[in-house]
Image (tube, rainbow, N blue to C red):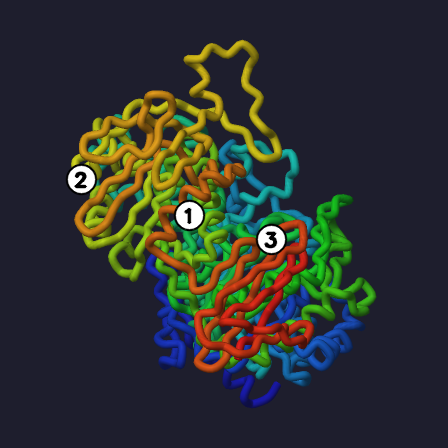
Amino acid sequence: MSASRREFIQKVGAGVSLAWGGLRIFAGPRTLLGAPGAGQSAPPMKQFLYGTQFFRPPNPPRALRREMLKTIAQEYRFNIIRLWPNWDYVNPEPDKWVFDEVEEVMKYCDELGLKALVGLMFELAPWWLEQKYPGARFTDARGQPVRIQGSPNNVTGGWPGLCLDWEPVRQASARYIQELVKAVAPHPSLYGYDCWNEPHIEPAWARNIWALPQEILFCYCEKTIEAFRAWLQQKYGTLDRLNEAWTRRYADWKAIDPPRALGTYADWVDWRRFIIERSTREMKFRVETARAADPKHIMESHAAHHPPVDGCVTTGTNGWRLAEVLDVWGMSLFPRWQFPVIYHGAAKFEITRSNAAGKDFYLTELQGGHGNEGLWRSPKMRPRDIRIYNWLGVTTGAKGVIYWNYQAEATGREATGYGLVARDGSATERSLEAAKNNRLIQEHWDLIKDWRPQPEVALLTDQDNALLTYAAAGNEDPSTASFQGYYKALWNMDLWADFIEPSSLGKGNYKVLIAPWHLMGKKETCEKLRQFVEQGGTLIIETGFGLFDERFYYNPVVPPYGLDQVFGYREGESFWVNAGTEAQPLIPPRNLPPSDWVYYEPEIEFTEPLAIRVKANTYLTPLEITTATPLGKYQEMTVAARKKVGKGQVYYFGTNLGASIAAGNDNGMELLRAIVTRVVQPPVTAEKVRPRLVPGEKRSLLAVFNDATEDRTGVIKLPASYSRATDLHRQAPLPVEQNTVRVTVPYQDVVVLLLE
C-alpha cells in the first residue's frame, strides 16, 4: 500500500460521524464543490462526458476487461465508464471486503486515461445482513416482506436490499460506502459517485411479473410505520389536529396505520408525502456519507422516471428535492424499449434540466442495444437512434452521455440485451455511430459547454395533485397524460419548456404558463397565478382547476379563492368522459340515447382563437359565465372561456385538453398553437421537421429532428446572417439562400448543421 493511499484511508477512518434523522455528518475542509452536503454545481467541465457502463459482476469476463477498456479509450475515444460494485458481492461476510475486481478495473482506467463513475449499490444487500435482521426486509401493502434474491438486472443477488429505517442496516450501509471509498478514491481515474442508481423504493419496480397493485407499494415494515407516526407528530403536533385533518378519532398515535387500499384522501397524500421525503433523506444519507469520506469528487445520481410525465406515487421520489443535494443530476432513457416517441424523450430531458435547476445534467443511461426481458426483446437501437438521442441531449443542455451498457448482458432475464458492442466485444453499427457522434460533439464543445435553453413557456406541477389523483383513481393517468399532451404540443411548436413547482412562480421570465390537471387549489398558488396574469402573462388552465382545497374537501366554488370573479367563470357539475386511444378507439354502446352522448368522446366546437372541433377527455365541464368570453361549446353548454385580466389573459378549457392531445387528437394541439404562438415565437421553426438551435457568436449548431415514419423536408429561416451550412454527419455543404436553409431529414432521424 502506498503512503498516499495509507494517509487517505486514515483520514477516511477518522472523519465520519453518521445519523439518519438529523444527518450529523462532518468531513474535512471545503473544496471546489463547497461545504460537505452543500450540493453545489460541479467544477467546470473541460469536455463533454461520453462513455458507457462497463463493470457489473460477472460482466464483462475478467480476462477481457483490459482489452475492452483499451478499445473504449483508444478506438472509441470515450472518456468515462460506470462501475457497479455490488454491495452483496464485495461484502460477503460482516468484516470481509473483496474489492479486487473493482480495483483492477480502476487500475486499468488509471493506465488508459479513462474516468470512472462508481455506483453506491444499496439495492443489493449482503445475505448475512438479511439473515441477521430479517425484520428489515421491505414490506408491501399486503404485509408481505420481500426476501432478498436475484433479479433480472442483478444476478449476484441481494435485490431489493433492506429498509434503511432499521438502524443496523443504516450502519452497515454507511460502512459499505466508507470501505468502497477507501478502495476507489485514491485512484486518479475516479470521477465521482453515482450515489443512487435510478432512485425509487426499489421493490416498487416488481421483478414478480404477477405482482398485484398492493404488492408494489412500500414500505410497510414496522420501523417505517414508526417513522411515519413520528413524521405525523412533527407535522400536526397533537393527535386532535391530526384527527381533524383526517376526519378520524384515533385515541393513540399507535393506532395509526398507513393506508393500504383506496379510501380517503388526506391519509393517502400524507403517507406518500412522507415516503417522498424519506427518499430525499436517503439521498442525503448516501451523498453526505460519501462526501464525509471523500470531499473532492462529484456526487451524481440519475432518475429513470420523470414526473410529471411519469408517475411519482409508487416510486416515491421528487426530482427537485433529490437534485438539490447533489452536484450533478442525470437521467436514464431507453427509447426503443419504453418510450418510442421522440417528444416523450424530449420531455424527460427538459424535466431533468428543470430538476437540476442550473446544475449540469447528464444522460447517464442511454440504451445501447435491444432491451431484453427473458425471451422477449425490444426493437434494437439503430444508428439513427444514437444520433437522435445524442443530439436531443446536446440541444436540451445535457453535458454527458453514458450508454447502458458496453457488452451485452451475460445471464439472467436481461441476457443478450443492451450491449453497445456484440457479446464477443466486436464493433456494431451502434458503437461505431456512438464513436462518430462523440467526436462531433467534442469538436464543438466550445458551443455546447455553456448552452442551456431559456424557455419562455413553463408547465406548472405540484406533486400533491399527482398524489391526490392516485388516491382518487389508483393511478396517475389523468395527470401524466395531461402533461404529456401539453408537452407534445409545445414540442411541435418548436418551443422549449421548463417544468416548475409552485415555489418557482414569479421567479422566471415566462410569458406563457400552463397548469395541467391541477385539482388542488392552494391559496398561495392561486394568488401567484392571479399576479402572473395581471402582470402580463398568458395562463392556460383546464377542467377541475382548484376542485379541492388543501384539506382535500370539494370546494363550493371552482375556481376558488376569488378566482371565479377574477377569471369570470364558475365550473358546473362535470360529466365523466369515456375516451379511447390511438391504439384502442372507443366504441360506444349501441342505441345510445342522445342525452348520454356526452359521456362518449363529445366534441367541443370552438369559435376562438380558431374554428375547430376538439374531443373532450376525462371530464367535460359546463361553465357559468359572468365576465369571461365564451370560446367553445358542446351542444348548448359553454365549456371554454377566455378573460383579459390586467395586462394578461387566462384561457380555461372545460376538459383535460392535455390528455386529449396525448390520445392523438391533433386538433387540440392546433388550438393550443393558436394561443401560445401569439405570445411566444420559437427561434427557429418548420412545418414538417423539428429544428432546435444551439446559438453561438460566430458559429451555431442546428439540429433538425424528424419524428415521422417517412422522410421529410423542411425550410428553416435562420435567425442571423449565416452564409454557410454544413451537414456534420455527411460533411456536406447545404446552400443558404435569403437566410433560409432547406433540409431533408430521413425518417426518425436527425440532421445536424454547423452554421457559419
At mark 1, the secondary structure is helix
At mark 3, the secondary structure is loop
Dot 3: within a 10 Å radius of its alpha carbon, few (fewer than 14), some, or many (20 or more) residues? many
Q: Is residue 432 left or right of residue 275?
A: right
Q: Is residue 508 above or below residue 597?
A: below
Q: Is residue 421 left or right of residue 473?
A: right
Q: CA distance from mark 1 to mark 3?
A: 19 Å
Residue at position x 71%, y 63% from top? 383
Residue at position x 34%, y 52% from top? 678
Marker disc for residue 566: 2
Q: Is residue 399 left or right of residue 518?
A: right
- Asked whether the residues under the numbered discs 1 and 3 touch, taking CB atoms below 8 Å apart as contact, a structural biologist would say no
Type of residue at label 3? Asp
Residue 632 on image: x %, y %: 35, 31
Which of 304/390 is in front? 390
Residue 381 on image: x %, y %: 70, 57
Q: Is residue 120 above or below residue 127?
A: below
Residue 316 on image: x %, y %: 45, 46
Q: Is residue 465 visible?
A: no
Dot 1: within a 10 Å radius of its alpha carbon, few (fewer than 14), some, or many (20 or more) residues? some
Q: Is residue 256 visible?
A: yes
Residue 100 occupies quadrant: bottom right
Q: Which residue was labeled with disc 1? A: 673
Q: Nearer the viewer, mark 1 or mark 3?
A: 1
Residue at position x 26%, y 37% from top? 550
Type of residue at label 2? Val
Q: Which residue was labeled with disc 3? A: 707
Q: CA distance from mark 2 to mark 1?
A: 25 Å
